[in-house]
Amino acid sequence: MSITTNKKGNRIIYHYWDYSFEWTPQHLPGSELNPWIRTCDTLADEANEVLDSLPAPADDPSKRDRYALLRDNHTSDPKLEELWNQINAVPEWVDWDQIQRGQDIFWRYLVPVTNALTFVSLLGGMGAIRVGEILTRTGGFSAKVVRRRLLETVQHTIQVNKSAASLQPGGEGHLASVRVRLLHSAVRRKIMALVEQDPSYYDAERYGIPINDLDSFATINTFSSTVIWLGLPRQGIYLSAQEEEDYIAVWRLVAWYMGAPTAPFENAAKAKAVSESLLVNEFEPTETGRILARNIAVGLENTAPIYASLEYMDALTRLLNGDQLADELRIPRTGAWHRVLMWGYCFWVRVQSKMIPVIPAVDSSWHGTDGANEHWIEPQGDVLETPHGRERRAWERNGV
């Protein structure tokens, strides 16, 4: 990592993790990011405190569907009512035509976007400072569960991008996002309760509140900005300025439903600056992060949808994250054959990205509701469809 200036000294260029950019007034130094680790979605926490006092299903207390409890009891408590009104309110800045255009981008570039989400946002994201600290306390990404956790994430992403209607109140993407919000709050409350019993369980002074506001908008960043300005360009795909705005708009709305700060996603330029600020300030791979990154690759080896070898995934990880971050995460270097495969893969997705938009029949069948159920991801039964499944498994894995 390095910083350079031009001869006149009026431009500062940062070089971080094989990515270069100009530092501008829109970028955020660490001193402006750090306060976000001390704040969180307090409204969801207050609502969850009320929900925890409500009786769980008598036949199986573990099947506590927090969204259903909120829906059925929101008129009984002011905090529940406040949260219910918020999650069902559509911000004035939402343009549903723009949301649909942004969702179309996901389907148009499905393969490269999915690879960016898997190998940059997820695997590469294990280089972030606090990620491993939380994941290791909620079952994390052990090699045995990584595929299931990935499918859960993919299912949420598909629900979010299915159609504009899916992100309207009551739609699949809306409900999935609210459930994730309630789950994150429940995990945060459980971790902090354990910290009260044993302060050594989690270093809140160092890492901040678990799943804090910085963590929340950094997560949204990995689904949006990281894809646009890291994952796709490294596969030879560059979105237009309008496509960038549209794609960011989708995830700004998801951030609203999930209780994450939306200010970092007001427009594409701001989202890009915030993403680059996170790249500078929030990436410092630890041994825990290295283990989790390796678990992801091992857990996905020779499994659907791509049935890729570990060496192929290592090569793809290096392509999409750059050698600097890959070295820090101790991703093995691969030989010339796999580098040739990466060249061929990038050539294929570039050709595909050029051809699909100019063939209307193909474009319409490839994305949105026409194609949502035709691709490689299918409903995974109890793994994905049970609304309380994530929460139940988190407690089971954590021994709580």
Image (spheres, grey):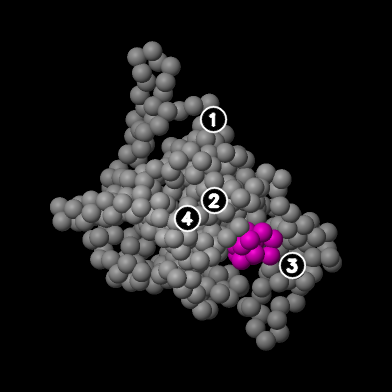
Q: Is residue 297 above or below residue 128?
A: below
User: Which residue type carries mark 1?
Assistant: Gln
| Label 3 crowd (10 A; few <14 / some 14-19 / many >=20) | many
Reading the image, the residue beneath label 1 is 26
Q: Mark 4 vs mark 1: which is more N-terminal?
A: 1
Could you say where residue 345 lies in the image, as x and y percent from the top left?
27, 55
User: Which residue type carries mark 2?
Assistant: Arg
Query: Could you give the CA–CA distance between mark 2 and mark 1, rounded to whole angstroms?
Result: 26 Å
Name the disc covering residue 106, or none: 4
Answer with left or right where residue 253 lies relative to residue 302: right
Could you say where residue 258 lies in the image, as x and y percent from the top left?
63, 55
User: Which residue type carries mark 3?
Assistant: Leu
Name the disc covering residue 70, or none: 3
Query: Could you give the CA–CA distance between mark 4 and mark 2, rounded to whole angstroms?
Result: 9 Å
Answer with left or right where residue 301 lies relative to residue 162: left
Query: Could you give the CA–CA distance between mark 4 and mark 3, rounded to whole angstroms?
Result: 31 Å
Reading the image, the residue beneath label 2 is 101
| Label 2 crowd (10 A; few <14 / some 14-19 / many >=20) | many
| Secondary-structure class at tag 4 | helix
- Residue ranking furthest to the top: 8
